[in-house]
Amino acid sequence: MRHAAHGSPRKVLEAAFAALDEGGDVVLARSPILRSAPLGPSKREYCNAAALVETALAPDAYMAQLLEIEALFGRKRRGGEWRSRVLDLDIVLWKGGAWASDDGEHAVIVPHPSFRERDFVLRPAVSIAGDWRDPLSGLTTRHLSARLTKPRHRPR
């Protein structure tokens, strides 16, 4: 969604990249901003991107930081899964492998449970981390993306 201070969704992502790069974390790489079709009932397109971030925090602490950034952009985490939002930040992969925690308020699962089926996640990820491996399947983001985009064989 548009943001009153930042403007278009593309500008929101630019501001989010800047916010990720503050407070001791370092954005090592960022993907181009891509447009994608919606999941769920929405009819509008979305802007998506990925960042490779170096942080000293564990995934649960880093996710708490991401939720704070979302809140600064006006995100309210109540209501349905398909609610419109200005910004949605996730941890898709982590150098340390698989991770799961639940503090009763927020569950953090890495790798993100749905990333293997989402082109809008994999395409940006491939552009900055094509050789990163999913710790559960052993496949790289490049291989996972290719599985989504390769033509399916149809029996004659």
Image (tube, rainbow, N blue to C red):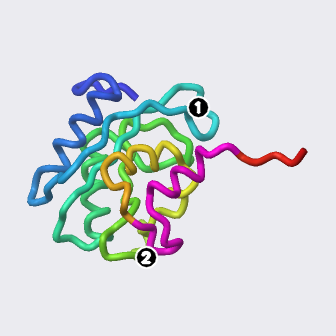
- Tell me the amino acid under the disc marked 1: Ser
Residue placed under numbered mark 1 in the picture? 42
Indicate whether 27 appears above or below 134.
Answer: above
Question: In which quadrant of the rendered image does the C terminus lie?
Answer: top right
Is 138 inside the magenta-drawn segment?
yes
* Residue 38 part of the magenta segment: no
Which of the pair 141/54 is nearer the observer?
Answer: 141
Up-down relation of residue 134 to residue 146 (above or below): below
Q: Nearer the viewer, residue 41 or 116?
A: 116
Residue 91 horizontal/vertical position (percent): 36, 60
Give the x, y percent position of residue 122. Answer: 46, 49
Task: Find residue 28 and name its label.
Answer: none
Spot occupied by residue 49 in the image (x, y as percentages of width and height): 35, 41
Question: Dot 2, how many residues are within 10 Å of its Cα: few (below 14), some (14-19), or many (20+)?
Answer: few
Give the SS element for disc 1: loop
Left/right of residue 90 with respect to residue 39 in the rendered view = left
